[in-house]
Amino acid sequence: MAKSGKTGYSSSRGTGLEIDKVVAELRALRVKSLENRQRRDRPPKLPSRKILVGIADGLSAVLFPNRLGLPELTNESVDYYVGHTLDVTLRELLVQVRRELRFTSGLETTSDSDREQAAAITQAFARQLPHVRTLLESDIQAAYEGDPAARSLDEVLVCYPGITAITHYRLAHELHCLGAPLIARMISEIAHSATGIEIHPGAKIGGSFFIDHGTGVVIGETAIIGEHVRLYQAVTLGAKRFPTDEHGALVKGNIRHPIVEDDVIIYAGATILGRITIGRGSTIGGNVWLTRSIPPGSVISQAQIRNEVYDGGAGI
């Protein structure tokens, strides 16, 4: 192995890999990309996904220390563990919030106002953790009551991907509302990568929310979901259309996702699109494609399939 004088990277001689050439081409692409952005010289660092993984794990342990924290915790040590873990985790979160605010402002260094705002966001977030715990307890209870395979609340907490996704969502939603939308999205996407469940942190979801199985579920940014709602795998609460401006660019932030009222069940594979309302107590069958509002108490299923047998050329 030998070091290249041009790049400072080690390259393998005699392998034909042309490391220096690849590095140079990647540098040229980075420069070209930066020229198309406002921050050309020193683009601010983004929040670290790797650190946010640890933050999400730490917050989960703070919320449920006896199940997601250290295995040897006792009644005497649990409060100390929660306090220590929360202190470390919030300090790390504060640094990441500062990064997001600096990135948003485009400044080379973090301003005093960004420091103050980051501290305010982190403090307000910490105060919301008991509320998050209360909501998650209702979600866990809903999963236990809604799944005949669930043997205990603890099993639901540590085994169900829907609870993992909802935990990340509820933490991310608070950060989204407090002014850290990038970090919120990253935390939600960490759960998406692990569970296959995509919940935008901007969505509004009431308590006792249950996602059974879960893989392929998509809940859009402006969706509103009431209390005691149950979704199964591959359900989509999405947008029906994507309007553009006079230049052909997508319009951002418009209200475009469904409202699902209380006590609704949506079965596997259903696709519900647009700003429509699913009335309270309704049931949406599997694989239904729905783009219109329905009144409370509705039961929507697929049209019955005709099955006819043609013999001897009949039907031709």
Image: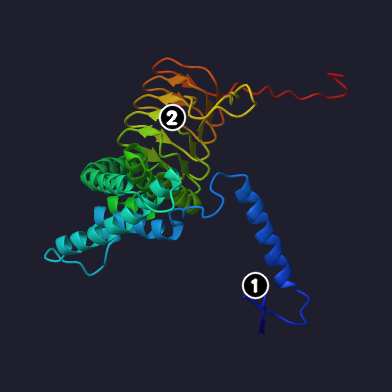
**Above or below — where is 105 with respect to 239?**
below
Is residue 13 left or right of 135 when viewed as pictured? right
* Three-letter amino acid code of the residue under disc 1: Thr
For the residues marked 2 and 1, what is the alpha-carbon distance in whole angstroms? 49 Å
| Quadrant, the N terminus | bottom right
**Residue 185 makes an appearance in the image:** no
Q: Name the mark on residue 223.
A: 2
Q: Mark 1 points at which residue?
A: 7
Is residue 78 left or right of 294 when viewed as pictured? left
Which structural element holds mark 1? loop
Residue 298 lies, in percent from the top left, at 44, 18
Residue closer to the observer: 236 or 274: 274
Is residue 280 left or right of 284 when viewed as pictured? left
Residue closer to the observer: 173 or 112: 112
**Above or below — where is 224 with respect to 188?**
above
Which structural element holds mark 2? loop
Total numbered labels: 2
**Above or below — where is 193 with respect to 279?**
below
Residue 62 lies, in percent from the top left, at 25, 56
Which residue lies most toward the left here?
76
| Quadrant, the C terminus | top right
Kindly indicate the quadrant of the structure image that contains residue 181.
top left
**Residue 316 makes an appearance in the image:** yes
Q: Name the mark on residue 119.
A: none
